[in-house]
Structures are given as structure tokens and as C-alpha cells.
Image: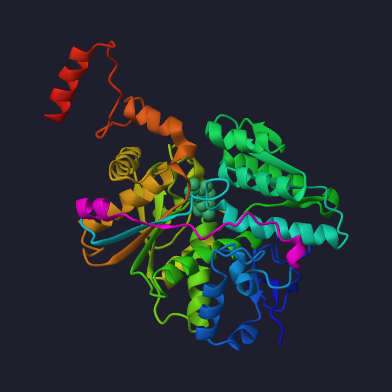
Amino acid sequence: MNYSAWFAAQDDPNERYPLTEVVYYSKSGGLLEVQHNMDALRQRSAAEWKQLFEGRWMRTSWPYGSGVWGKKEWVCPEIEDKNIVSMFEGGSNLFWADRLGQEIGVDDLWIKMCGNSHTGSFKDLGMTVLVSVVKQMISDGKPIRAVACASTGDTSAALAAYGAAAGIPTIVFLPKGKVSIAQLVQPVAHGALVLALDTDFDGCMRVVRDVTSHPDSGIYLANSLNSLRVEGQKTVGIEIVQQFDWDVPDWIIIPGGNLGNTFALGKGMQMMYDLGMINRLPRIVCAQAERANPLYRAYCNNWNYEPIAAQSTAASAIQIGDPVSIRRAISTLTHFNGVVEQASEQELADAAARADRTGAYACPHTGVALAALIKLVKRGEIKKSDRVVVISTAHGLKFSRFKVDYHEGALAGVQSNFANPPIELPADVDAVRRVIAERMG
Ligand SMILES: *Cc1c(COP(=O)(O)O)cnc(C)c1O
């Protein structure tokens, strides 16, 4: 029996398409899911899968040293190795957040550093799969001129980098003035066609859907409604379990915007469970910014969902009012006994600053997840002895403006409780000694 995968309609599993077909929606208009031939995967025992994955982990035999492609049979089995576009994504470290844990009352706290990656965010995990499938399609003779996405910053950085590595043209739609300098310059540097539109993310999404909707456009859509990205992103949870020697943590906390990543985390965990690799599931917490919190509102209202207009937040990558993956994220959260929590600008900025004081370097989205953790510990939902993993979605260095503003006391609506601004002095030894004595005692 062969390892294989295909797109399937959610409401009709018999409606199937090959992964190399240009199709985003089912006949009834729903999202498509990637399904795997689970009977074929079951022919290897859990112990054999573990051994195979361990043997490939972080080594150099192409492309299996990549955290994503080391699990190729579970991700995208039929693609030819020569068409894989990989930058050895995945395999990011688990940061042992011992000091932060002591401060907030968790003995076993870890941060999965997905920002330690080629383009500085977890988006690389999914983009390697999508761009590889596009390369396969082009090599099969499909008429694809370019790949396009709307982005809050990190998706476009990843798409532009992988496109450049493969020699495939890319087009990115960004909300003008709403992404960080680092995020803007990445697609510019990689030679993407960068279109800064005078709207928000949701507005960019509407435009890119329209531009790519005609099958003859020759422009392939890379947003997370395209389920290929989920297949790569789902490896994050598998990696976490692998890094704990195949032990499942009690809680995984993840920041959510468009909610594809929340769904992907659950999908990877469920696949491990279905293939007998683990015998229990973690609880999942999705953390949202209070100023862009449609999932949180639904959670508080019996899962009744209403799109909102997202307000501006320092957690710009999750400033989304009408998430594409809302339905599948709700089904993940109900299945994983999930919790949704939110963080105000004050809470997310202080949480990131506290983490930085203990040696982490948290982006604002990681700040949202850490703020949610602090609230759940205070409420007693997360216990001191629980093993908790916070997913850090991007590298703090992509958000220098946020950090500078915080430490200068210039973040809108935020009191910088942990600010540590530099002290300007004349080049005078006595003045320097005075300040050291004041500050260091
Ligand atoms: C994309 C992104 C998110 C949100 O992921 P979704 O799948 O849209 O929920 C969170 N943090 C960062 C840094 C991101 O780039």
C-alpha cells in the first residue's frame, strides 16, 4: 500500500482532488482538507515511525534533516525529492523558561522557538510544503506564472524567500503601514512584487482572493485557506512531543489570528494519536489580542461566531477580524478541551518584557500567549506542576520598533512597567560611577 494524500471536501469525503490541482474550495464552497491514506501509514508501527523520525532528525541527507521533511510520509508523501524547496525549517529548540516559570508559578515551562527559522517565523513550516507542491506542479507542466498571498507580514516574508529559492515569481499584498520594517523589507529583498494596499489584512485578503479566483489567472493562492500549509505547520506539535522523548505536555498555548496554526497544531497531535504514537492529548489554549478577538468572543458566547473589525494591536500578525479557519479552529478547541484567552495591549507588552528580563526575546504575539498563561495560572486552571509549552511564533528581532517603543514609554495605551531605557551621560568617570552606585547598590 502506498503512502498518499489528497484534498477532500469536509462535507463529502468522496469529493477528492490531487494535491497538485489548482483548487481551493469544495463544490459546496467549504475549505478543502488534506487527507492521508491512514491504512498505509498504519502498516508501520508507532515504534518504527519513532525510530525513522529520530534517525532523520537534524541530519544532512536531503531533504530529511528538515523538521518538516523528516516526516515527509505524514506531510506530503508523493512529491519528488528534487522538487522540494527546503531551508531546513523546523527542528527549532525548546527554550527552558525556568526563571520565567519560577516568577509566574509554573515549574515546567518551555517555549517552542518557532521564530528561530530562516525567515524568523513559524510560517516557514507551511511555506516549504506549499512552494514545493508548486514546483512539482510547474515540473508537471501546469501553467503557473506566480504565487500570491495577503499577509500581516510573516507569510509574505516566507513566501518571498521560498519563491526566490525556487526561482518562482511571488506577489504579496500587505496592509500599508501595518507591518514591521523587517517584515516589509524581507519580500522587497527577495524580489517579490510587493503591493502595499490602503486597507487592513481582511481587505488585502478580499483582493487576493479575487485576483487568484479565476482558474486561468495562472496565479496560485498561498494563504492558509490553502490547506497545504497546514500539513507543514502540523509538525510543530509532533516535534514538541518528539523533543520530550515522545511525552505529551499538559498544555500547549498558541497565539491565533487567522487560526490556521491552531488547527494545524491539533491536526498533528490527532494524527499521532490515531497512529498510536501517543495515548493522550494535550489541552490547547488559543490566545488572542483583545483588540482582535473574534474567537475569544465566540468562546464566551457558546461558540457563536461573528466577524468583527479588528482594531490596531502591537500583535500585528494576529490583527484579523474574520479568520479564515474559524470553523476548523473551533472544532479543534472543542476536541482538545481547549480554552481561549485574550490579552490587552498592556498585558501582552508587559508579558513580553518580563520574558525578556529572564533571557527570552519575545515577539508581541508570544507576549499574547504568555499573558494568557499568566491569567490561567492565576485562575488556577494551569497548575504549578503542569508541563506547559508556549509556542513562540516569531523572532523578537522582527519587532524591534515594538520593543524600542515599550522601553521608551511610547507604546500607545501602555504603561511600560518593565521599561529599561538607556541612560545618557557625558563621558565622565565620576558621573558613570554615580549611576552605577545608584543602580547596582
Ligand atoms: C501568522 C502569525 C500568527 C497567527 O497564525 P494564524 O495561523 O494566522 O492563527 C501568529 N504569530 C505570528 C508571528 C504570525 O506570523
How many numbered marks have been drawn onto this rendered protein structure? 0
> Which residue lies at the image location 61% right of the left edge and 83% below the top edge?
41
Residue 435 placed where, x, y %? 18, 20
Image-quadrant location for residue 234: bottom right
Residue 45 placed where, x, y %? 54, 87
Res 301 seen here? no
Is 24 colored magenta in this rendering? no
Of residues 88 and 391, which is closer to you in this image?
88
Of residues 266 and 132, which is closer to you in this image?
132
- The vertical placement of 324 against 6, above or below, is above
Residue range (magenta): 80-104
Looking at the figure, which quarter contains the C terminus? top left
Looking at the figure, which quarter contains the N terminus? bottom right
Scheme by which the image is coloured: rainbow
Residue 229 placed where, x, y %? 62, 59
- Outermost residue, left direction? 441
> Which residue lies at the image location 75% right of the left edge and 51% below the top edge?
166
Of residues 304 and 363, which is closer to you in this image?
363
Tell me if 369 is positioned left or right of 23 in this view.
left
Is 90 colored magenta in this rendering? yes
> Which residue lies at the image location 61% right of the left edge and 37% below the top edge?
186
Res 266 seen here? yes
Of residues 104 and 426, which is closer to you in this image?
426
Tell me if 115 is positioned left or right of 134 in this view.
left
> Which residue lies at the image location 13% right of the left edge and 23% below the top edge?
438
Residue 225 placed where, x, y %? 63, 57
- Outermost residue, front direction? 429
